[in-house]
Amino acid sequence: MLRFFAVRGLSFIVLTAFGVTVANATDLLPSWNDVASKRQIVAFVEKVTDPRGSDYVQPAERIAVFDNDGALWGEQPIYVQLVFALDRVRALAPEHPEWRSQSPFKEVLAGDIAGVMAGGEQALLELVMASHAGMTTDEFAAIAGDWIATAKHPDTGRRYVDMVYQPMLEILGYLRANGFKTFIVSGGGIEFIRPWAEEVYGMPPEQVVGSSIVTEFEMRDGVPTLVRKAEMNFIDDKAGKPVGINSHIGRRPIAAFGNSDGDLQMLQWTTAGSGARLGVIVRHTDAKREWAYDRESAVGRLDKALDIAGEQGWTVVDMAKDWSAIYPPVAD
Amino acid sequence: MLRFFAVRGLSFIVLTAFGVTVANATDLLPSWNDVASKRQIVAFVEKVTDPRGSDYVQPAERIAVFDNDGALWGEQPIYVQLVFALDRVRALAPEHPEWRSQSPFKEVLAGDIAGVMAGGEQALLELVMASHAGMTTDEFAAIAGDWIATAKHPDTGRRYVDMVYQPMLEILGYLRANGFKTFIVSGGGIEFIRPWAEEVYGMPPEQVVGSSIVTEFEMRDGVPTLVRKAEMNFIDDKAGKPVGINSHIGRRPIAAFGNSDGDLQMLQWTTAGSGARLGVIVRHTDAKREWAYDRESAVGRLDKALDIAGEQGWTVVDMAKDWSAIYPPVAD
């Protein structure tokens, strides 16, 4: 997948350097069936890139934002970052004998995920801090990068980075070929995503927005160091997403792709701007090839955003019907 | 200046699209005399862009960060953003009769800047909040953009945006021509700088890092809105600069340009990385064409960073000797 992506990227750069619009959706979106959602996305892109049209948007303003969990890769049965946190707690357990008798750590070590979940947000926060804080930013990037390089989903046997959605990779490439700058805007940790987002999504670290913990600069034995503290700094979810967009991007996107109520305000903020706007909800309808869930799901619940999608003119993607492939081909 | 800059930008894009290194420092740095500081900067750029050399750096990692006040434009006798705050307080005064008897507002309205300064940080914070908060992000961007379009420095008669340093504009262009991505990392307000940074510096909003106040998402009469609150969120100065860099850029720069002790930690963080690194201090030595100040200045104090510049191998630019021009030519 990565090689395929890289070669493509190169040809895009050459073509777009001279302002040639590469809007050949047939070539660039092969995993999309000829359905309404695809046609709406393509119509939007053709509209904002047509310099003779009234909806034309200058390249600098062609900002597209993407949720990560459930929009660019899978999120069931639990967020990948939570799997990482649980694995880290297990790996660190020998250094923490006290965890054997402390919730939520003892539940993690006993493999009692339901017991962990029963602890609610406080339990999850404790696990995140125990696994994500207390080291330098460089150390954490290495830990997260090493983990993601090999960690596999228990059901599919695929690496998590091979559970990205092929049709969404194609959308990223299609938008970039049309002069868009793409950003991830995730409720997940910004420093958990950055170590691999460039290789997997073609998304450089400065185009990743996410939740963060407090980070402080310290001189340690004369060496300038950034240390991760066990304290939340910013939660880039729900009403936090437009705030994160404003902080990191500084202009309002013209296109937003999400899949859950956590993306509701990002979709509202994006599509309320003047001129042509695109809001897209990826709906998980494919129990056979992926997972089917919406209003009742604890992870990636899609309820209110789905209710108002129609009146807002947002595009709803039906994964089962609209996508001919879910995941990229994997070289074995 | 702006047209000059735009035409230049275009030629750079075409040349760099095919990976041609445009390292012709003679052409691109005409306002630099043939001095040690220029030679050090050029040697660094040639080193990291030479694919056959051991110091070669991939384009994606060619991140350069620039302080704004005193490094890209003037900062004397008081920061431009403080001039803006004072002007805003005067403009808003008719709506606030109570200010006539309240410090620091009454001092502002009486033109008693020394009296304002006597109030210290707390006074400045009150002025910033009164002038920068309590409106939407869109409203503030319009206010700041309108102000900067016409506001002039009382001594030079130039607009502040025409008091940017021509040799530094050339450095920005030279680095971009060599595949660098440039960022502003300012102690000033991120939303004060963004409305004009693209036109003046060629710096898009997503490449501006700065201090910020708390911003919240609200639905106002069904309209998604971002509201600026009277509370500091992040101070991007001193030890905050590496934190801001980490948050917004997510990788360590290989080059940093500053001018004061507020840039010390940014210079340390940048130049402590492995491989070739460039740290540059712009030293204000030109009392005739600009201002001369360093260790004793309340604004832009340069003391500790100057002490350790030598041992750190940082380049010190002597504005009076090294620059043949200070400001860009202005069309009258």
Image: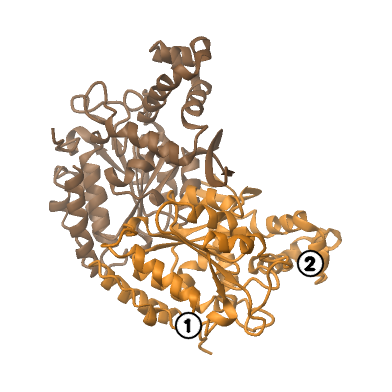
Chain colours: A orange, B brown
Residue at 53% from the left image edge and 90% from the top image edge:
A332
Residue B173 image position (x, y, % from top left): 23, 51
Q: Label 2 marks which chain's residue?
A: A
- Asked whether residue A178 is in view, the answer is yes
What numbered label is drawn on residue B142? none
Residue at the far bottom in the pictured view: A332
- Asked whether residue B271 is in view, the answer is no
Left or right side of B151 for B128:
right
Left or right side of B246 for B48:
left
For the C terminus of chain B, which image quadrant? top left
**Would you place residue A146 above or below residue B263 in this image?**
below
Residue at 70% from the left image edge and 57% from the top image edge:
A130
Could you confirm whether marks 1 and 2 are on the same chain? yes
**Would you place residue A273 above or below residue A37 in this image?**
above
**Would you place residue A308 above or below residue A319 in this image?**
above
- Give the image quarter of residue A23: bottom left
Residue A273 image position (x, y, % from top left): 45, 51
Q: CB atoms at circles 1 and 2 under 8 Å apart?
A: no
Residue A198 image position (x, y, % from top left): 46, 68
Q: Amino acid at mark 2?
A: Val
Left or right side of B174 for A33:
right
Instruction: Judge the density around disc 1: few (<14), some (14-19), many (≥20) Cα neighbours within 10 Å.
Output: many
* Mark 1, residue position: A31
- Give the image quarter of residue B166: top left
* Mark 2, residue position: A108
- Judged from the image, the secondary structure of the residue bearing numbered disc 2 is helix
Residue B330 image position (x, y, % from top left): 16, 35
- Judged from the image, the secondary structure of the residue bearing numbered disc 1 is loop
Decide which of B39, B101 is in the foreground and name it: B101
